[in-house]
Image (cartoon, rainbow, N blue to C red):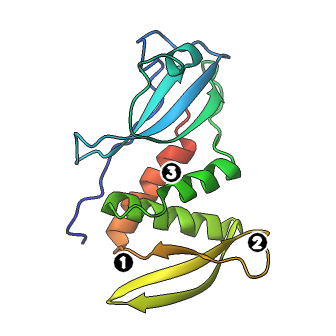
Amino acid sequence: MSRISTSWDIGRFTGQCAATGEPLSPGKQQVVALVEREDDPSAPLVRMDFSEAGWNSPARPKGVIAFWKATVPEPGEKKRGFVDDQTLLDLFERLGGDDRIHRVRFRFVLMLLLVRKKLLRVTGTSSEGGVETWHVLPKGAVEGESPLAVTNPKLDEAAMKEVTDQLGEVLDGAW
């Protein structure tokens, strides 16, 4: 079992704009943001929904690490995944170079997903000072391009499931 809790409630579609509090209307565009909250270490990543006007207002939160546009579903509409491959790759890149444990864990599991989707390929691993690093290249990388380094946080089965569930919330939690 992991010594550091990774059980975060990222949240699901709220139906209202986080900036204005107004309801988000079915069929209208919304902006979904993954926000880091440094004020609450028990829930460092949180999902926030915005109307376009709310997103473009001064009330936009600090700590946004990823955002994407989606259409607010009609009542009873079948749930579907909503994050495209480029958004996942952008999120993966933004999380690079950050050594905060929740981001390292999230990035590692995201890397595994991107490898499975064949958007990244593992070129090798290295170990220094007891820290294992995976080296990956994006699909279509040119010969000689330097691989990206991804720290393996050595997640046990329970921690891996928790982070995978959180990633699932980001990918499937449109509503």
> The residue under label 1 is which amino acid type?
Lys
Front in this rendered view, residue 46 or 97:
97
The residue depicted at 56 percent of the width and 46 percent of the height is: 171
Which of the two marks, 1 or 2, is nearer to us in this view? 2
Rendered location of residue 37, percent (x, y): 31, 40
As shown in the figure, which amino acid type bears the numbered disc 2?
A: Ala
Q: Give the camera-side residue of 115 and 78.
A: 115
In the image, residue 108 above or below residue 173? below
Give the tally of numbered discs.
3
Q: Along the horizontal axis of the image, is 28 left or right of 24?
A: right
Residue 96 vs 121, above or below: the answer is above
Where on the picture, by quarter, is residue 130? bottom left
Quarter of the figure that contains the N terminus: bottom left
To which residue does mark 2 refer? 141
What x and y, as percent, mark residue 98? 40, 61
Q: What numbered label is drawn on residue 168?
A: 3
Q: Of the residues under marks 3 and 2, which one precedes in the sequence?
A: 2
**What is the secondary structure assignment of the residue under circle 1?**
loop
Precedes in sequence: disc 3 or disc 1: 1
Q: Residue at x 27, y 43 (%)?
A: 38
Q: Position of residue 126 (x, y in %)?
A: 48, 89
- Sequence-wise, which precedes: disc 1 or disc 2? 2
Query: Could you tell me which residue is drawn at 64 percent across and 70 percent down?
Result: 115
Q: Nearer the viewer, mark 3 or mark 1?
A: 1
Please indicate, yes or no, whether residue 46 appears anywhere in the rendered image: yes
Question: Is residue 86 shown left or right of residue 44?
Answer: right
Q: Which residue is mark 1?
A: 154
Residue closest to the eye, 75 or 142: 142
**Distance from the alpha carbon under mark 3 to that under mark 2:** 27 Å
Q: Quadrant of residue 146?
A: bottom right
Q: At 63% across and 56% down in the image, what residue appears?
A: 89
Q: Nearer the viewer, mark 3 or mark 2?
A: 2
